[in-house]
Amino acid sequence: MSNPQRPDAWDAGAYDLFADERTRPFYDLLARVGASRPFVVVDLGCGTGSGLLTMAHRWPDAQLIGVDSSIDMLAVAATALHGFPDVTLIHADARTWSPDTAIDVLVSNALLQWIPDHGELVAAMASWLGPDGWLALQVPGNFDAPSHVLLRRLAGSPQWIGQLGGALRGADSVLDAVGYLRILRQTGLSVDAWETTYLHELSGPEPVLRWTSGTALRPVFAVLGDQDAQEFSGQYAELLNSAYPADETGRVLFPFRRIFAVARREENV
């Protein structure tokens, strides 16, 4: 079994192990944003800056702002965006940050699932848009998938519940597409919301464990010591190997549901 890292915050290296698979939903999200010449573009939860880099190329005249709570992620983003003078990176918590000017394009990709009861934040994000502003969000919708159900079940077992009780997010961590549509529509925006299930083909040793080590396992690693984290990961790997066996090609098929919403403020004021 691979030796898991134990990050106390975001581990950019672990997150980027499956960079192609993780960034595809962002491209699908951004493709539905019709802004032509935005002035202020914000990536709330910008991570390693890959999304900001894409938007810097698409809108070279825009002022781009990336906000993230992870110093590690922002350091990687600063390197990726070196040479782009119109990009500002801000170390802040998305729950308390707010802009000091109207936003033309606001993107939140794979962030909101980490923020409990984020409906009010989504409504606040809509209020930050200027005339003809665009809001685009994407969250994972796989909390009922075996990867997460087995993780919560193991964390709730007699061996681990004392340390991990309440540490993991449940299936109510995100809304469905209808839920986000209703919130955004109530703010006066026109909304396009949808869901997509990606079928990732993963390879290498214990690929689903390596995938979750960059995301879902973070709260576990933040609580457990190194030895316990190693033992927990070994038990979790056995469960994952049964739930996601390799096929005849040696690859693991890993379905991953994603939830999207793109909204626009259409009034000209």
Image (cartoon, grey):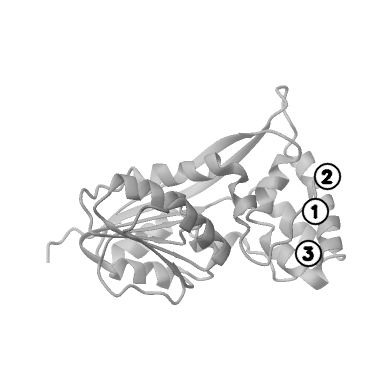
Work out how far the residue at label 2 is from the one at label 3, CA to CA, in angstroms: 22 Å
At 36% from the left and 64% from the top, the residue drawn is: 183
At 30% from the left and 48% from the top, the residue drawn is: 33
- Locate residue 124 relative to residue 12 in the image: left or right: left
Looking at the image, residue 10 lies above or below residue 165:
above
Residue 203, image x, y percentages? 68, 33
Point out the image quarter for the N terminus. Answer: top right
**Mark earlier in primary sequence (3, 1):** 3
Residue 71, image x, y percentages? 55, 66
Q: Is residue 258 visible?
A: yes
Disc 3 marks a residue whose amino acid type is: Gly
Q: Is residue 260 visible?
A: no
Work out how far the residue at label 2 is from the one at label 1, CA to CA, in angstroms: 9 Å
Disc 1 marks a residue whose amino acid type is: Ser
Tally the numbered discs. Answer: 3
Looking at the image, residue 202 lies above or below residue 81:
above
Residue 46, image x, y percentages? 46, 58
* Badge 2 density bin: few <14, some 14–19, many ≥20, Cα 10 Å: few
Looking at the image, residue 147 lies above or below residue 226:
above
Pointers 2 and 1 in contact (C-beta within 8 Å): yes
Residue under circle 1?
A: 233
Residue 1 image label: 2
- Locate residue 177 relative to residue 150 in the image: left or right: left
Viewer-side residue, 126 vs 90: 90
At 31% from the left and 66% from the top, the residue drawn is: 126
Residue at the limit of the structure toward the left, as seen here: 269
**Mark earlier in primary sequence (2, 3):** 2
Residue under circle 3?
A: 156
